[in-house]
Structures are given as structure tokens and as C-alpha cells.
Amino acid sequence: MYWPKFSEAGLIKKIRKGRSRNGVTCTYIKWTKHVGLKVFTSKWARDQCAKLQGIAAENKLGPKVGEKAQFEVLWGETDDWDSFENAPQMRMKKLYCYFTEHADRPRKYQRTGKKRRDLECKLHRVGIDHNDLHTENVGLVNGKLVCIDFDYVSCIKCKPGEKVNPDADSYS
């Protein structure tokens, strides 16, 4: 997979074009046709999500993970101020990110219920307990359903290098 080089100017350009999707702990920005960028306000959250997504990706249950980066931006706490006296305090804030393989959203008419349950079982087998696997937290990579959101995930018994057959039908 080709991973683009990170640049703050490129990030600002993508944000201005409105190509971002906000989650609870991260913002997803589609960077190229095949690559996205996940942006976090916490280094710990970025590292935890990248680690768990990496485990899923090794087992073909999540998108591939690319390079990590961090940068500083001018940050204001609110956008809804009407006068200079009510203006938000501006300060520099560090943001943490990593590149990820882009996963397409399943079409609304595609039923993902059984496949989502199968995906959850396969994730569990590699040590990932996903507590929030719903339609918005899955995507398609090469037509295969994968987990795309690792915010509310706990690692229950991760064994480095352990792999499963992602096409297996049994989970015993």
C-alpha cells in the first residue's frame, strides 16, 4: 500500500474542503482515494486505537495502519461568540494522527447484521472485545466487512502475532 507523506498544509486543505467525519474521540479525513487520516486530541487515544486497529488489520478484520504524526494548531474552545468580550481563549494544542487504509461505507440497502456479528466473533478470537460495533463502525475494504472504529474497544487477550482465518465460519 502506498502511504502519502503527512503535511500540515495538506491537512488544513482537506479540513477546509469539508472532507472530515467526526467521531467521539477522533476525526476521520479522507486523504486520497485509498487512504484516510485519523486525528485525535490525545496521544494515548491515538496510540491505543492504532495498536488495536493494527491487530485487526493483521488478521484482515480492519483497515491497514500507516505512519503516525503529531502537530500543533491554534485552538479555540467555542465557535459561537458574538463579541470580542465573549471571544474564546485561543491557545496552541497538539493533535495526534495516523494514516489508515480507507474503508468505504456500506450502502444503506446492504444488510450487515449477520456479517457484523461474525466480525465481532472474529475480533474476539484475536483478543479484541468491541463494545460498540454497529453500522457506523464498520466499512468495506475490497468488498470485505471490517471494523473501522476502535474508540470503545478493550484488548482482552492479545497474543502478538496470533492470526485467525478471517474467512472461517466457526468460532469454537
Image: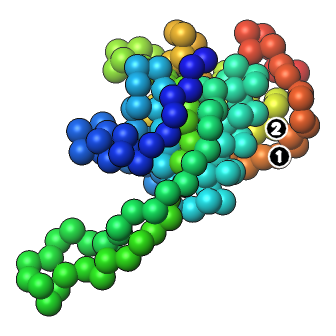
Q: In this view, does 152 lie above or below 137?
A: below
Q: Nearer the viewer, residue 55 or 128?
A: 55
Q: Residue at x 83, y 19 (%)?
A: 164
Q: How is the image coloured?
A: rainbow
Q: Where is residue 56 in the image (x, y as percent from the top left)?
A: 71, 30
Q: In this view, does 3 lie to the left or right of 157?
A: left
Q: Position of residue 98 (x, y in %)?
A: 57, 42
Q: Where is residue 158 in the image (x, y as percent from the top left)?
A: 86, 40
Q: Nearer the viewer, residue 132 or 159?
A: 159
Q: Which amino acid does label 2 sit on?
A: Gly
Q: Is residue 121 left or right of residue 14?
A: right
Q: Position of residue 150 (x, y in %)?
A: 61, 43
What is the number of callouts on the image? 2
Q: How crowded is mark 2: few (under 14 residues within 10 Å), some or many (20 or more)?
A: many
Q: Which residue is drawn at 54% across and 16% down?
A: 141
Q: In which quarter of the image is residue 65?
A: top right
Sequence-wise, the earlier of marks 2 and 1 is 2
Q: Which of 54 and 75 is in front in this view?
A: 75
* Residue that carries the numbered disc 1 in the rendered image: 156
Q: Which amino acid does label 1 sit on?
A: Ile
Image quadrant containing the N terminus: top right
Q: Which mark is residue 127?
A: 2
For label 2, the SS is: loop
Q: Is residue 92 above or below residue 11?
A: below
Image quadrant containing the C terminus: top right
Outermost residue, bottom side: 85
Residue 5 makes an appearance in the image = yes
Q: Could you give the CA–CA distance between mark 2 and mark 1, rounded to whole angstroms?
A: 5 Å
Q: Do the residues labelled 2 and 1 touch (CB within 8 Å)?
A: yes
For label 1, the SS is: loop
Q: How crowded is mark 1: few (under 14 residues within 10 Å), some or many (20 or more)?
A: few
Residue 129 makes an appearance in the image = no
